[in-house]
Amino acid sequence: MQMYVQEVHTDLNVLLRVPLGAMRDISFAQRGPGYLDVEAARAQLSDAVTLWIAGNLNFDLDGQALGLPELIDVRLALPSDRSFVDLETARGVFAAPRLSADTELYWEQALLDVSLQFALPGAGELFFSPGFARLGLRTLLEVQYLPEADDVRNLVLIGDPGRVSLSPGVSSVFASFAAAGFEHVLSGIDHLLFLVALLLPIRRLQPLVVIVTAFTLAHSLTLSAAVFNLVPGALWFVPVVELLVAASIVFMAFENIILPGLDRRWLIAYGFGLIHGFAFSFSLGETLQFAGVHIPAALLAFNLGIEAAQLLVLLLALLVLRWLLRFLPEKPTVIVLSALIAHSGWHWLTERFAILQQYHFSWPVFDAALLALATRWLILVLVAIFIIWLARTLAAYFNIRLDGRAAK
């Protein structure tokens, strides 16, 4: 389905195109071998709009419902008609002649074009709650919102996503994306297991802070890079990242068992944090369209939500681990827990490798697009290396200061 929503002074004009075949409870008049009787069916189109469309267009202004719309016009269109490619041609549909009575068109193939109008009670944040999921097994609604004095917004709504802001303010964007980042971490069992494996052998606060900071800086870097389209858009990139996330869990768990060295763990956390940041970006990319013009605020809020959830998980895991170590020996406990984590990670690794094998990879053609992508990746690598250099320099500086104080 395609929909244009435009604010004009005190009115909200809506142009909508829906497949007529989705309106299953109405027996449209037919003739001949199943052709739609265009002339006789015109009287039924208003009933179709009332039954299937008007009540499912739920707009509200800061919580004040706009109510039912006024039906301005309703038309039939051929499946080959491309008038809804932009707002101007969509408007032209309702000024053009109607389909002639002798048009040979099966009713399931017809398109229904509707012009509706809502009264706006004032200014405020406009919300939309679509109720079109009952029209089919799967529904996809392309929305273009055109406010009077703001940028045009394009949304793609699958099913019924709930209450969506068409003109979000920065505060509502910040709150919703912070909650999304928090929920994403708590719902991602693979990410949680990596965090637990990361902290299992750590008993002191200082190395824990360093490791968590390194991991945070890394995933923030790649998450930001992905949001601003600095990463590949190939289909194979997502399964590659998911595979590497599973590999990070297995690697960290085996390191806890074989060689639980903490001196370089911050560097390992930084490297794997780059990969986990790409994984976070896949979730953020699906919802970034709801941020409107507040992309930086959404990115910051999503990151803060992730950090809050990570700190909560680390705190709870440390408390549980300390409680366990009151009754169990430390080293065997770390080994057993790491083995359980490695077992889960290995299953994910094999499953995701099988998924990756289904994708066809071909060597890219060397052209300007490839050169631009390589340049973006080079910039990302240089920034990542700079952060490592800066961290090492600061660590060396503070170690010298601490050693000097200890000598005095």
Image: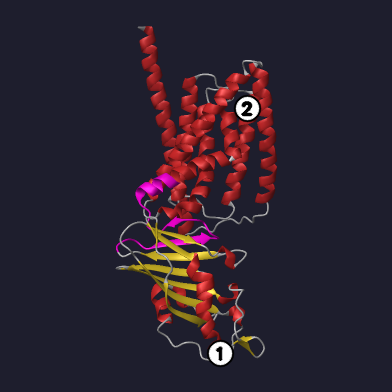
Where residue 270 sits: x, y (%)? 50, 34
Few, some or many C-alpha atoms within 10 Å of disc 2 (few <14, some 14-19, many ≥20)? some
**Res. 258 in view:** no
Which residue is denoted by mark 1 in the rendering? 103
> With respect to residue 4, does 174 lie above or below?
above
Q: Which residue lies at the image location 39% right of the left edge and 9% below the top edge?
A: 406
Where residue 204 sits: x, y (%)? 51, 19
Outermost bottom residue = 102
Outermost top residue = 408
Q: Which residues are magenta?
A: 149-176
In the rendered image, which quarter is residue 213 located in?
top left
Whether residues under marks 2 and 1 lie with C-beta atoms below 8 angstroms apart, the answer is: no
Amino acid type at circle 1 is Thr
Left or right relative to 194: residue 157:
left
Which residue is denoted by mark 2 in the rendering? 255
The residue nearer to you, when weighing 384 against 54, is 54
The residue nearer to you, when weighing 294 against 33, is 33
Task: Identify the image's colour scheme: rainbow, by chain, secondary structure or one colour.
Answer: secondary structure
